[in-house]
C-alpha cells in the first residue's frame, strides 16, 4: 500500500508541474506539500525498518532499493523517448534529402514535447510500485 500511495503522489506531482492554468503561488504550494508528504512517508517507512549492525549495504535496503529501481525505470523511459525523437529526426532528414537532392538544406532539430515526454511517467510510477506490492517483499527486500 505504501508504494501505491507514493506512486499516486508522484503522479499528482507531475500533473501539478504541468498545470499552467493554476496560479503560480498555489501550484508551488501544492507541489511543496506533495514533496513534503512524500519525504515524510519515506522517513516513516525507513524508520519502521529494523536497524542492524550486519553486513547489509544501504543500497540493498528498503526504501533505497525501490527508489533505485524507479530511477532506472524512469531513465529507461527517458532513453526510449530520446531514441524515438532521434528516429523521427532521421526520417525527416531522409525526406529532406530526397526533396532537395544535392542542394543543401537545414537539418531539423530534435523536437521535445514536454507533455508527450511526461505521459509515460504518469503510469510508470504507479505501475512499478504496484508491481513491487504484487511480487511482495520480505523484511523490506524484494524476493
Image (cartoon, rainbow, N blue to C red):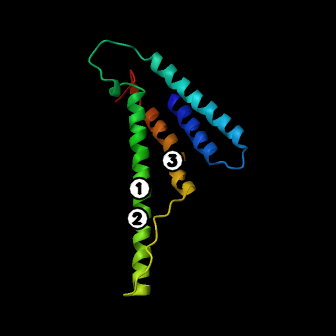
User: Which element carries disc 1, helix, strand or loop?
Assistant: helix
Residue 136 found in image quarter: top left
Q: Mark 2 and mark 1: span between their CA atoms?
A: 10 Å
Q: CB atoms at circles 2 and 1 under 8 Å apart?
A: no
User: Which element carries disc 2, helix, strand or loop?
Assistant: helix
Q: Label 3, on which residue? A: 121
Observer-nearest of 63 and 82 = 82
Q: Which mark is residue 53?
A: none
- Measured as percent of width and height from the top left, residue 60 is found at 33, 27
Observer-nearest of 1 and 37 = 37
Which of marks 2 and 3 precedes in the sequence?
Answer: 2
User: Counting other residues with Cα less than 10 Å from the Cα at mark 1, is it few (<14), some (14-19), or many (20 or more)?
Assistant: few
Residue 115 found in image quarter: bottom right
- Measured as percent of width and height from the top left, residue 8 is found at 57, 37
Pair 3/2: label in front = 2
Location of residue 16 with respect to 44 vertically, above or below:
below
Location of residue 80 with respect to 40 vertically, above or below:
below
Count of numbered circles in the view: 3
Q: Label 1, on which residue? A: 80
Q: Is residue 104 left or right of residue 54?
A: right
Q: Mark 3 and mark 2: span between their CA atoms?
A: 20 Å
- Measured as percent of width and height from the top left, residue 135 is found at 41, 34
Q: CB atoms at circles 3 and 1 under 8 Å apart?
A: no
User: Counting other residues with Cα less than 10 Å from the Cα at mark 2, is it few (<14), some (14-19), or many (20 or more)?
Assistant: some
- The residue lying at 38 percent from left, 13 percent from top is 51
Location of residue 35 with respect to 27 vertically, above or below:
above
Q: Mark 3 and mark 1: span between their CA atoms?
A: 12 Å
* The furthest residue to the left: 55
Q: Label 2, on which residue? A: 86
Which of marks 1 and 2 precedes in the sequence?
Answer: 1
Observer-nearest of 47 and 22 = 22
Amino acid at each position: 500500500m505504501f508504494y501505491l500511495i507514493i506512486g499516486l503522489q508522484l503522479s499528482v506531482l507531475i500533473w501539478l508541474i504541468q498545470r499552467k492554468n493554476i496560479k503560480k503561488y498555489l501550484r508551488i504550494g501544492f507541489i511543496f506539500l506533495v514533496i513534503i508528504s512524500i519525504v515524510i512517508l519515506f522517513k516513516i517507512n525507513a524508520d519502521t525498518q529494523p536497524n542492524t549492525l550486519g553486513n547489509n549495504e544501504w543500497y540493498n535496503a528498503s526504501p533505497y532499493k525501490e527508489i533505485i529501481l524507479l530511477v532506472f525505470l524512469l531513465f529507461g523511459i527517458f532513453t526510449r523517448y530520446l531514441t524515438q525523437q532521434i528516429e523521427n529526426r532521421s526520417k525527416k532528414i531522409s525526406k529532406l534529402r530526397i526533396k532537395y537532392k544535392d542542394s543543401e538544406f537545414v537539418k531539423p532539430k530534435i523536437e521535445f514535447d514536454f507533455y508527450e515526454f511526461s505521459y509515460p511517467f504518469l503510469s510508470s510510477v504507479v505501475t512499478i510500485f504496484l508491481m513491487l506490492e504484487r511480487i511482495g517483499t520480505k523484511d523490506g527486500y524484494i524476493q
